[in-house]
Image (tube, rainbow, N blue to C red):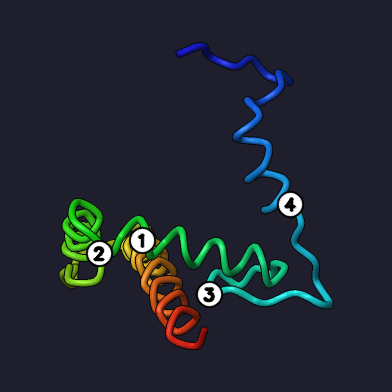
């Protein structure tokens, strides 16, 4: 696989997703579980991508793994502030994935 150098153009399939992600708008968009405002179309696509990735087979098992090292992990009283913040950030990310999966299910059921 060829490496891109700084400033080099991305392959065409990457551009499409990048353009959609950059189409975020503040006043008229939809706020996602990550706290970022996207167009409704991009928000829906991100929800569907999350559900498609983590709802079957290896994705389910991988999400279970992520939960086992984040949301089901307990740090002891000797944990540092840095350790706690790191784990909370990881938990937040797993929560974003779960929220997007739930939103995709709601979208699908509502159609």
Q: CA distance from mark 1 to mark 2?
A: 6 Å
Residue located farthest toward the bottom when viewing the structure as drawn: 110
Give me the residue at 21% from left, 54% from top.
62
Tell me if 26 is positioned left or right of 1 in this view.
Answer: right
From this viewpoint, which residue is outermost toward the top? 2
- Look at the numbered disc 2 and give the secondary structure of its residue: loop
Question: What is the spatial separation of the Cα atoms under label 1 and label 4, in whole angstroms?
Answer: 24 Å
Q: Secondary structure at mark 4?
A: loop
Label 3 crowd bin: few (<14), some (14–19), many (20+), radius 10 Å: some
> Could you say which disc has been placed on residue 33 in the image?
3
> If you read the primary sequence from the N terminus, does the residue marked by circle 3 or circle 1 appear first?
3
Q: Are marks 1 and 2 in contact (CB under 8 Å)?
A: yes
Q: Pointer 4: what residue?
A: 22
Q: Viewer-nearest of labels 3 and 1?
A: 3
Q: Which residue is mark 2?
A: 70
Q: Earlier in the sequence, mark 3 or mark 2?
A: 3
Whichever of callouts 4 and 2 sits on the residue coming sooner in the sequence is 4
Q: Earlier in the sequence, mark 3 or mark 4?
A: 4
User: SS at mark 3?
Assistant: loop
Q: Which residue is mark 1?
A: 90
Disc 1 secondary structure class: helix
Instruction: Give coordinates of residue 39: x percent, y percent.
Output: 72, 68
The residue depicted at 39 percent of the width and 72 percent of the height is 101
Percent position of residue 85, x then y: 39, 64
Q: Does label 1 or label 2 sit earlier along the sequence?
A: 2
Compared to residue 26, the image places residue 83 above or below, namely above
- Report the residue at 57% width, 69% height from top: 44
How far is disc 3 from disc 2 in space, using C-alphas? 18 Å
Residues at badges 1 and 4 in contact (C-beta under 8 Å)? Answer: no
Q: Nearer the viewer, mark 1 or mark 4?
A: 4
Q: Is residue 83 above or below residue 98?
A: above
Q: Quadrant of residue 55?
A: bottom left
């Amino acid at each position: 696989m060829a490496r891109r150098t700084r400033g080099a153009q991305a392959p065409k399939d990457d551009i499409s997703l990048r353009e959609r992600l950059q189409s975020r708008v503040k006043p008229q968009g939809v706020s996602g579980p990550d706290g970022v405002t996207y167009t409704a179309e991009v928000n829906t696509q991100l929800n569907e991508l999350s559900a498609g990735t983590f709802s079957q087979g290896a994705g389910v098992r991988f999400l279970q793994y992520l939960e086992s090292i984040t949301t089901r992990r307990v740090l002891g009283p000797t944990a540092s502030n840095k350790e706690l913040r790191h784990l909370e950030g990881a938990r937040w990310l797993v929560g974003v994935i779960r929220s997007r999966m739930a939103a995709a299910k709601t979208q699908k059921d509502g159609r």
